[in-house]
Image (cartoon, coloured by chain):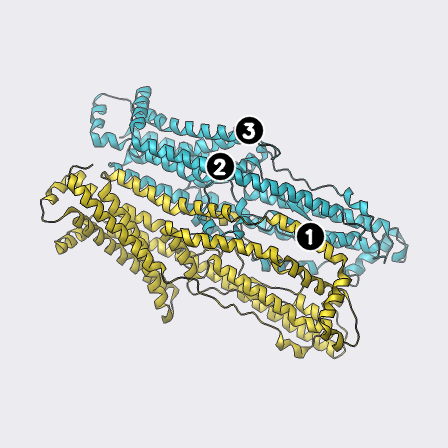
Chain colours: A cyan, B yellow
Amino acid sequence: MIAKTFLKETKELLRDGRVRIAVAIVFLLLGAATWISARQYKNVNEQYVAAKKAERSIWDNQGEKNPHSAAHYGTYAFKPKYPLSLLDQGVDKYAGTSIFLEAHKRNEAQFSAATDQTGLARFGDLTPDFVLLFIIPLLIILLGYNSFTKEREMGTLTLLKSQGFSSWKWMLGKWMALFLPILLMATALFLVAGVVLSNLKDFGVFNWGSLFAMYLVFVVYYGIFINIVLLISARTKKSGISLVVSLCVWIIACLGAPKAASNIAESKHPYPTRQEFAANVLKDKKEGLDGHNPWSKEAKLLEQEVLLEYGVDSLHQLPFNFDAYRMQKGEEHEAEVYFKHYNYLKDQYSNQSKVYKSLAAISPYLPTRFLSMSIAHTDYSTHWDFADAAEEYRIATQKFLNGNFAENSEYGNWGYRAEAGFWKNLPAFDYNPPELNSTLARNSSNLWLMGIWLITSFGLLFLSTKTI
Amino acid sequence: MLSYNFKYELKLLLRSRWIQLLSIILLLLFGFSTFNGLHKIEKRKKDITAAHSEVEENDAMMLKLLDSVEQGMEVSASRWTIPTSPMAVGNYHPRVAAMEPQPLAFMATGQADLFTHYVKPKVSGDDHTLNFAEMTSPVQLLFGSFDLAFVIVYLLPLLIIAFSYNVLSSERESGSLRLLASQPIRIRSWVLQKMGLRFFWLSVIVLYALCIVFFMVSPPLEQVSAFLGLFGLIIAYMLFWFALAFLINLWIGRSAKNAVALLGLWIAFVLLIPSVLNQLGNTLYPIPSRTLMINEMRSLKAEVTKKQDEILDNFLRDHPEYAINDTTQFRGFYHRYMASQRLIKEELAPMINAYEDQLRKQQDWVGIFKWFSPAIIVQESLNQRAGTSTQDYEDYRKQVVSFAGSWREHFMPFLYNNKNFSQKDYPDLPKFQFVPKSFSSLLTVPLLFLISIGLFGLGFFVSTKMEKNGILTTS
């Protein structure tokens, strides 16, 4: 029964001109999207490599300079693009790509692509994730909306019933007939993507495991949509109504819920404005040690502490340059302040994530989107991860520079210059995104949500075909 | 026939609960989106007010400090923050350059979530590194906002499609078309009348919902013209989709096929054409790489720093007035710094302009090709009416940069004449006032109407051809 239903449905789909056109359009879109994304990806990566190299040579060739001047001169950390971003661009367009690393200050990543584009950019881009997340579910609706209703409309349901058929086998046949073409499409797409990506040179480490995980996520997503579409088809009496209801579900899940979630998340857990954030940081900074100000209360306190520790009675007798030591202590205080304020932002975001997760109850799109972005390393958490790594590097750089200053000069000697070759000793900034396992572990709630969606929707479909 | 049709159609729509359903859905959507928009505006206003009051507080402290210094008292502030130094005022007491929301800003978020609404330019630092990007979670930017513009541009067409995809086909499918064919009316006029009536009722509901929205915002009377303009725009957009539905109804046949075709058009107009145009614009007029800009900027700065003394000399040669008025002839860090900054700004100008030029070219490109999709036209027009379009923010940026220039210039005579800043100089500090410019074009709505009417015309043409083949037999 399963096989027969499956064969019959597949034949019908193959004979239907609509289906052929729709599938052709989807493939065309996918092809165009992949081609555009691949070009963009290559472009961005070339720029990244060039910028990284140029920046390092600027840093290395500073010449003789006071280490603290070099700290103020600063350097840049550039965010790399990862192979799977070819499939899911995620939030890359909206997140900055470079972070300026300087003394006393943690800077935000700046220059996101979206700020350099026209308002049209907000409509979205023709990228593979757009086709995977929006268009293929629509294709599922188109293929499956009349799966059950047509039996009613043509009167074949009565015939079937009189045969004493097993309804779950019948349903499973129909399910397979819908699932198989989608599965084939997804498999073909991911295989092609895998081959293309593994042949690109110099662009990060491509991992077949990650690609496979992403593939599974999308297959489950399509499974959920197939369940929903068939469920609606089984519960409605007319094809037209089934189509309209399925479309409503699609609109709510893919368009409405994410936008509503973003509004609710923002109004419940708002971010401070950039200026507010800066003002708050400044306020906290003032309450502690300022490395540049030897006259403040905190500086005097530090002075006494150090004198006591070394058992000397003047700063000149210390074995190192106290100016640089104070600078380093100030740097540590400032780093702590930034840590606190950025943690507040992270807390706000994790609260916002809860809103997104609670709205996943009406939208399987949300957990899928978050999972796929995470696996592709184009999500917000990876961005945070990168920013944190850059901050760690910044703190280490300051320590490295202040250390050189403290060791090689004596108190009061602001004229000290480190030799020209010194800068090369600073290790280069290197960032590695989290591994697949830790990405999945971090997203366990999204995995759960998708699992629940899949099982519940299938269970409902099973129950409703029993009573058809 | 029209009056009969009118009565019958209204009864049908009421009995099938379409009108009730549409009213409720539209009211909910309009209400929710307006609520979201208002919430955003409220936050924006609150932020700006807070920034202003913070500056006021700081100013009071600054004046107190100045007073103490002028009376020869000891002050506890750090040496370089004492406001007798003009550079301290310029750096530690910047003014707020805010972009206040326009009256209709609640309608369309546009670029408002991407860009900040106030900055405080200082005398040091570069104009082009003024960060105009707002601190937002990129996830929010990715998903966008559930605003009135989203309801109008994305959802309203879908409601129209659901409302009208089977006007003719359902009659054929239920067999009543043959009965109708015996009536003394042409099928296409009959479909047109039915469509017209549906359009009329939907317009009434939209008008009603829009009135409620504007009542929620409690507008002053001057917004009547804005209201009418907005209503005109929505009606024109609705007419476009009804025209498409009319065409498809005549052209294709079965309900499900109609729905699929209309949905395909929706995807093409609302999702595909905008994104393809955007990407083509980016490919044709690529924005130069920002990362490479950073490299260039830094090598230039490194070069300039080495030649600071020379630059200052040249600068003073060009500005002899500073050398004459100053008796002390003291030259410190800021004298050199400000002179080099000026040079850096001049040198970088062509590079910075390249970004603006490319963006302008992209904008022009969109300006031409937006006529491919009414969704773009309406979205753009709504953003412009709300004062949240790309051009609005570009304009704001320009105003801020010019203000930053005058803020810097204001302190130059103080600096190079080595003159202290005093209490009596306070009232002369430049202030920023955002002057909104209107970017919306009056032509948009009439042109959109023309397009829609053209589509109806096409519908008539098509149906004449089809009538020769017999409308009852087509399926």
Q: Do the residues at pointers 3 and 2 share their chain?
A: yes
Q: Secondary structure at mark 1?
A: helix
Q: How many marks?
A: 3
* Residue marked by disc 3: A209
Disc 2 to disc 1, how far (Cα)?
Answer: 34 Å
Q: Earlier in the sequence, mark 3 or mark 2?
A: 2
* x and y percentages locating residue A329 in the rendered image: 76, 53
Residue B400: give x, y in percent of width and height.
Answer: 57, 64
Circle 3: is it few (<14), some (14-19), or many (20+) Cα within 10 Å?
A: few
Which amino acid type is shown beneath numbered disc 3?
Answer: Gly
Above or below: residue A65 compared with residue B79: above
Q: Nearest the camera: A147 or B188?
A: B188
- Spot occupied by residue A296 in the image (x, y as percentages of width and height): 77, 63
| Residue occupying the point 28% across, 41% down | B259
| Mark pair 3, 1: CA separation | 40 Å
Side of B367 relative to A441 (left or right): left
Q: Secondary structure at mark 3?
A: helix
Q: Which numbered marker is on residue A35? A: 2
Placement of B201 over or under B221, stated as above or below: above
Q: Tag 1: residue type?
A: Arg
Judging from the image, mark 1 belongs to the subunit labelled B
In the rendered image, is residue A230 in sight? no
Residue B108 location, x and y as percent? 42, 57
Subunit bearing disc 2: A
Identify which amino acid the numbered label 2 is placed on: Trp
- The residue singled out by tag 1 in the image is B298
Between B197 and B26, the one nearer to me in the picture = B197
Q: Is residue B148 above or below residue A437?
A: below
Tell me the quarter of the picture where residue A377 sits. Answer: top right
